[in-house]
Amino acid sequence: MSPSEPSLRRAAAFAPSNIALTKYWGKRDARINLPLASSISVALADLGSYTVVQPQPDLPEDVMVVDDQELDPAGMVKVRRVLDQIRELSGSSVYAGLRSVNTVPAARGLASSASAFAALAMAAAQAYGLALDGPLLSRLARSGSGSASRSVPGGFAIWHAGHRADGADSFAEQLYAPDYWPLKVLVARIGGRKKISSTEGMRLQGGGGSPYQAAWIEQCQRDVESCKEALSLKSMRRLAEVVEGNALAMHASMIANRPPLIYWQPATLAVIEAVQQLRADGCECCFTIDAGASVVVLVEPQDARIVAETLAQIEGVEEVLQTHIGPGARIVESREEDL
């Protein structure tokens, strides 16, 4: 390390995955992950990514291991995009060794990349001696994965689409703390990795593949305001109307794409029908679906048990994960064995 290098240290962070209540499916600038519409999300308390960053002066390049496997070159391009910005801010030229462990399944429509890049941004900033505010950390995480911007603040968060070409006004901030509306979150995990990634799917649809894309973005802009109102009232009925409608509109636009983007499995539709019936029977719950087959259900605590038991009995549902709305990315204790 040269005399001009900043103080470097090992640092670790945990960031939650997040599930969008209103989606952002569509980018105005794919290079730096700028969305066409703002979006609102909730953070999943204990489903996410734990990442350790150790700057090492003797490394010839950055190296990252994810769940005991070295990250592929395409993944490293995104990781370096974040790290290079942090090195530029810190004035360092030192590469880093990184290790990440995920508690959320990848490629299932559960936003595993969101937690991964939020944890990376938080841990790397600490490792390179930077004290960054929430909006800047959110923008850094966004450069790796768009939805990662929402995992930084946690709780009930809004990701502002922004208007600037450089993305300086496109970041996420918290609307409400996790305990504002202490809903339970159930994840009906449905098997099978998705064949088309979210990044590729948005690229295909953004190229004019869907005749409904423009209408979808206009609907998102209206749904953000409707979602804010539902949250302010803590009304499950109103939340279900906007959240379920937004998810179904996104998938309708995707299915209409040429070629079609179909992420659902038979169990996906079965869960949708079960949740709607449960609500008709008096359970306070609603569903949403990201770009994948798994279904996420928000439910009032008193109804969580019966909803979870019902979903677990559906053929094709591998398991029902139970969590709640939690805080955003945060520094945690690192262990020597992590690198």
Image: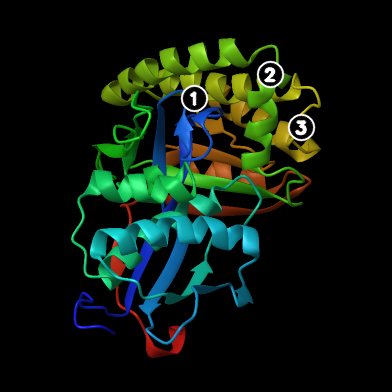
| Residue occupied by mark 3 | 262
Colour scheme: rainbow
User: Label 3 sits on what residue type?
Assistant: Ile
Question: Badge 2: how crowded within 10 Å, few (<14), some, or many (20+)?
Answer: few
39 to the left or right of 259:
left
Q: Secondary structure at mark 2?
A: helix
Compared with residue 172, is residue 117 higher up or lower down, i.e. above or below?
A: below
Given this view, does label 1 or label 2 mark the residue nearer the observer?
A: 2
User: Which circle marks residue 243 in the picture?
Assistant: 1
Residue 83, located in which quarter of the rendered image?
A: bottom left
Distance in Å between CA atoms under marks 2 and 3? 17 Å
Residue closer to the observer: 316 or 87:
87
Q: Quadrant of the N terminus?
A: bottom left
Q: Earlier in the sequence, mark 3 or mark 1?
A: 1
- Label 1–label 2 contact, CB within 8 A: no
Q: Amino acid at mark 2?
A: Gly
Q: CA distance from mark 1 to mark 2?
A: 25 Å
Callout 3: helix, strand or loop? Answer: loop
**Residue 37 x, y percent position in the rendering:** 44, 23
Q: Amino acid at mark 1?
A: Val
Q: Residues within 10 Å of mark 3 (few under 14, many from 20)?
A: some
The residue positioned 59% from the left and 37% from the top of the image is: 290
- Residue sitting at 73 percent across and 21 percent down? 209
Q: Which-is-in-front pick, marks 2 and 3? A: 2
- The residue beneath circle 2 is 208
**Residue 96, percent from left and from top:** 42, 75
Image coordinates of residue 116 in percent, x first then y, are 48, 58
